[in-house]
Image (tube, rainbow, N blue to C red):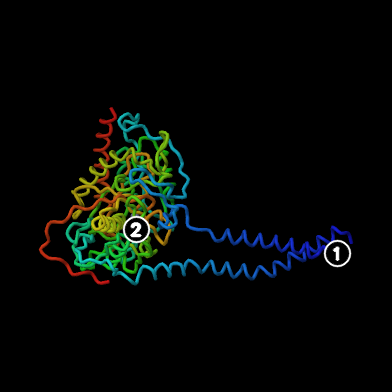
C-alpha cells in the first residue's frame, strides 16, 4: 500500500496538472478570427484588393439563392412596403441634447408614413410596432419574406442641419466584402443580398431625395451611397432616410416633419412603382 | 480493505491534495488574465502615443479631410503645414493622430475627442488597418451622416497622403465591429481612392494642435 499510494498520487497530480493546463489554454484564447493581425504574426496573408480577403467575420454565412437578375425578375409591381423604424428597445439610437431619443421619433414618424402608404393602397409591414429590440438580421428576415416589396429604414441623425433629410442606398463600390460574404457557385450570401438590387435602390433613393429636397430645406439634391449595415442584407430595393436631427429644440419640431416626410415617401414610391413596372415588362 | 479500494482512496486523496496545490495558482492566473486586456491596451498606447515625430520626418503640406463648413454631409480638404514621416506606417499614425486632434475649426471635427489610435499597420498590397479605442464608437454622434463623415475623413486623409494604400480596415479595441455607432458597416474593407487635389489655396491653416 505504501508503494501504491505515491504512484496513484503522482498519477492524480499529473491528471490535475493536465486539467489545469487545459483550462489555462482555453482561457488564454487569442483574437477573434475576424481581426487582421499585424504583419509580424504572418497570419494575415497578402491580399489582392480585387479578390475578397479571407473570412473577416465569425458569422456563418447563410446561403440564399440569388434574386433573379433585375432585368428578368418575375416581380412586376411593388405591392408591399417594409417600413423600418430604426433602433428600438435597448438600441436607442441617437440621443439629443434636449432629451430626444432617436428610437422614439423613428417609430412615431413610421406610424404616420404607414398610414399614408396604406391610404395609397399599399400593403405595409413594420419591422417593429413598439419599443422592441429587433436585430439587423431579424429586420432583414421580415423584409426578405415579403414578395414584391421595397424596404425603407427611417432614422434621425445627430449632426446635420435641423429639418433637412437625406436618402441613402448601399454603395458596394465603397466597401470590399469579407471572404465569408462573397458569392460562390451562383449563390449569394445573406450578407450581400442587396448587391444585385443596388441600381434599383439607387433609383429609389434618387426619386426619394428629389421629393425630400423639395420639402425639407437644406437637404441635398442627390442621394448618397453609404455602407449602411442594415441595407446590406436586404433582397429587394432598399433605402434609408435620415431626418435631422435629435438636437432639435423639442420632439414636436421633429414630429412636424412627419407629414411632409409621408408625402415625400408616398410620391417617390408611386414614381418608383411606375419605373419598376416599366423595366420589368 | 481491498487493493482496488486502497488505490481509489489514495487517488481521491491525491486529487484533493493536487487541487489544494494548483487551485490558488490557477485562480491567480485567471485574475491575471482578466487584468491583461487593460495592461495590453496600456502597452499599445505607450508604443503609439509618445513619439509622433520620427527621424525621417519631412516638412510637407498634409492633406487633411474634415467635415465641410459649406456643404453638409461632405468632407473638405484642408492643407496643413507639418512634418510627416517617410515611413508609411509612421506617417499613417501621424495623420490619424492629427485627424483625431481635430481641425482648426472645431465645428468641422469628424472623430470624437478622446479617441485614441491604438494601432496602425499595413498588410501587403496596400491594406491599412487602423485600430481605434472604443471611444470612437461610444462618443461618436450616432447617425448615418456623422458616421459616414468619420469614415470618409479617415479614408480620404490616408489615401491622399499615402498613395500606395488601396483598402482600409477599421477595428475597435482590436476587434472587428459590426458597425461604427449603429449604422456604418465595419465588417468589410473600405476601398481607398486618393481624392482629387483641391484647387490652389490662397493660404494654409496653421497646424492643428496635438
Ligand atoms: Zn439611426
Q: Is residue A269 above or below residue A253?
A: above
Indicate which disc, 1 or 2, sits on the residue closer to the N terminus: 1
Q: Position of residue A127 (x, y in %)?
A: 40, 47
**Label 2 lies in ligand 1 vicinity (Cβ under 8 Å):** yes
**Label 1 lies in ligand 1 vicinity (Cβ under 8 Å):** no
Q: Position of residue A260 (x, y in %)?
A: 24, 50
Quarter of the view holding residue B96: bottom left
- Give the mark toward the camera: 1 or 2: 1
Q: Quadrant of ligand 1?
A: bottom left
- Left-right relation of B6 to A120: right
Residue beneath disc 1: A1
Q: Is residue B200 above or below residue A227?
A: below
Q: Which mark is residue B118?
A: none
Q: CA distance from mark 1 to mark 2?
A: 75 Å
Residue nearest the observer in this picture, A251 or A7 = A7
Quarter of the view holding residue A122: top left
Figure quadrant of the C terminus of chain B: bottom left
Disc 1 chain ID: A
Q: Which mark is residue A102?
A: 2
Q: Position of residue B66 (x, y in %)?
A: 23, 61
Q: Position of residue A167 (x, y in %)?
A: 26, 48
Q: Is residue B142 visible?
A: yes
Residue nearest the observer in this picture, A66 or A155 = A66
Amino acid at each position: 500500500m505504501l508503494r501504491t499510494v505515491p504512484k496513484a498520487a503522482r498519477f492524480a497530480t499529473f491528471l490535475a496538472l493536465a486539467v489545469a493546463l487545459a483550462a489555462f489554454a482555453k482561457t488564454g484564447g487569442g483574437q477573434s478570427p475576424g481581426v487582421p493581425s499585424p504583419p509580424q504574426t504572418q497570419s494575415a496573408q497578402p491580399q489582392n484588393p480585387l479578390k475578397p480577403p479571407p473570412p473577416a467575420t465569425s458569422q456563418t454565412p447563410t446561403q440564399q439563392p440569388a434574386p433573379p437578375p433585375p432585368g428578368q425578375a418575375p416581380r412586376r409591381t411593388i405591392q408591399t412596403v417594409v417600413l423600418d423604424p430604426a433602433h428600438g428597445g435597448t438600441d436607442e439610437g441617437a440621443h439629443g441634447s434636449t432629451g430626444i431619443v432617436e428610437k422614439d421619433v423613428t417609430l412615431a414618424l413610421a406610424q404616420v408614413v404607414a398610414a399614408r402608404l396604406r391610404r395609397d393602397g399599399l400593403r405595409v409591414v413594420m419591422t417593429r410596432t413598439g419599443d422592441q429590440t429587433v436585430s439587423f438580421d431579424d429586420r432583414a428576415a421580415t423584409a426578405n419574406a415579403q414578395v414584391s416589396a421595397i424596404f425603407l429604414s427611417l432614422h434621425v441623425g445627430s449632426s446635420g442641419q435641423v429639418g433637412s433629410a437625406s436618402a441613402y442606398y448601399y454603395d458596394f463600390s465603397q466597401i470590399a466584402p469579407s471572404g465569408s460574404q462573397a458569392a460562390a457557385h451562383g449563390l449569394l450570401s445573406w450578407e450581400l443580398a442587396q448587391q444585385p438590387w443596388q441600381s434599383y435602390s439607387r433609383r429609389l433613393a434618387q426619386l426619394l431625395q428629389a421629393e425630400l429636397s423639395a420639402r425639407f430645406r437644406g437637404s441635398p439634391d442627390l442621394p448618397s451611397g453609404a455602407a449602411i449595415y442594415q441595407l446590406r442584407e436586404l433582397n429587394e430595393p432598399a433605402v434609408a432616410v435620415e431626418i435631422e436631427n435629435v438636437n432639435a429644440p423639442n420632439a414636436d419640431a421633429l414630429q412636424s416633419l412627419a407629414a411632409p416626410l409621408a408625402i415625400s415617401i408616398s410620391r417617390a414610391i408611386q414614381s418608383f412603382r411606375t419605373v419598376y413596372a416599366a423595366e420589368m415588362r | 480493505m481491498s487493493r482496488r479500494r486502497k488505490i481509489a482512496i489514495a487517488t481521491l486523496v491525491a486529487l484533493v491534495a493536487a487541487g489544494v496545490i494548483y487551485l490558488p495558482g490557477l485562480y491567480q492566473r485567471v485574475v491575471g488574465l482578466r487584468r491583461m486586456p487593460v495592461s495590453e491596451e496600456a502597452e499599445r498606447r505607450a508604443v503609439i502615443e509618445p513619439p509622433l515625430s520620427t527621424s525621417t520626418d519631412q516638412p510637407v503640406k498634409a492633406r487633411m479631410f474634415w467635415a465641410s463648413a459649406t456643404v453638409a454631409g461632405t468632407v473638405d480638404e484642408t492643407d496643413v503645414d507639418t512634418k510627416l514621416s517617410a515611413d508609411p506606417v509612421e506617417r499613417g499614425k501621424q495623420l490619424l493622430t492629427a485627424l483625431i486632434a481635430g481641425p482648426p475649426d472645431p465645428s468641422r471635427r469628424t472623430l470624437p475627442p478622446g479617441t485614441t489610435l491604438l494601432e496602425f499597420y499595413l498588410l501587403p498590397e496596400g491594406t491599412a488597418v487602423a485600430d481605434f479605442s472604443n471611444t470612437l464608437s461610444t462618443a461618436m454622434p450616432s447617425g448615418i451622416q456623422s458616421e459616414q463623415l468619420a469614415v470618409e475623413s479617415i479614408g480620404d486623409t490616408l489615401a491622399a497622403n499615402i498613395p500606395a494604400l488601396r483598402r482600409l480596415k477599421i477595428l475597435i479595441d482590436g476587434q472587428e465591429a459590426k458597425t461604427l455607432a449603429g449604422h456604418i458597416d465595419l465588417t468589410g474593407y473600405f476601398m481607398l481612392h486618393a481624392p482629387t487635389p483641391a484647387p490652389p489655396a490662397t493660404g494654409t491653416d496653421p497646424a492643428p494642435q496635438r
